[in-house]
Image (spheres, rainbow, N blue to C red):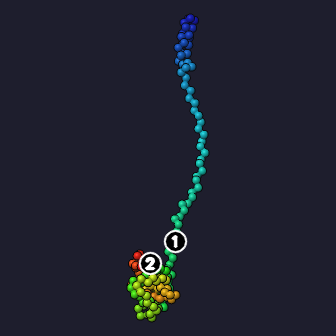
Amino acid sequence: MKKSTLFILLLGLVLCIPGCGFEGAGEAVVTIVEATPTPEPTPTPEVTPTPAAPAATPTPAPVMEQSPSGVNVEKKDGTYYAVADLNLRADCTAEAELVDSVSAGTQLTSTGVCENGWIRVDYNGQTCFASGDFVSATAPEGTADGGNGE
């Protein structure tokens, strides 16, 4: 019985050794895991306010004056030309005193525009008024400013 026990023991040992999970050096797999460091939080960028649109430049209010009879006159410089023979008056009405007369094509330097359509002009150093119906901002044909140089 000693021989049979020894034989069974030896047979069990031979059968157990391959079943231990050892398969040899060539078939082993090793996985290397690298630790990833925790990222540092990025600082929140400062919020810069969007610049506001530039404020619109207000249109200056027109400078208003009054004629001798109390009619509102907007101060406005310009150049006008008489389109017909024209009477220049002391105020902005047809009944006002006659100051002077000019012929068609005469250049007049405007200093204001009356609310009733008359033009305040400086003529020979004197303030006069001309009816807006008889003046134009465009030089007439035949004058130095109007084209053919007569």
* Residue at 50% over, 74% down: 59
1 and 2 marks in contact (CB < 8 Å): no
Quarter holding residue 94: bottom left
Residue 139 shows up from this direction: no
Q: Which numbered tag is attached to residue 144?
A: 2
Q: Position of residue 116 (x, y in %)?
A: 42, 86
- Give the structural element (helix, strand or loop) at label 1: loop
Element class at badge 2: loop
Between 119 and 145, the one nearer to me in the picture:
145
As measured in the structure, the alpha-carbon distance from the residue carrying label 1 to the one carrying label 2 is 38 Å
Q: Amino acid at mark 2?
A: Ala
* Residue 7 in view, yes or no: yes
> Where residue 85 sits in the image (x, y, percent)?
40, 87
Q: Is residue 116 left or right of residue 47?
A: left
Which of marks 2 and 1 precedes in the sequence? 1
Q: Residue at x 59, y 36 (%)?
A: 35
Where is residue 33 shown, x and y percent of the image? 57, 32
Residue tagged 1:
57
Q: Residue furthest front?
A: 150
Quarter containing the N terminus: top right
In this rendering, would 142 be left or right of 28?
A: left
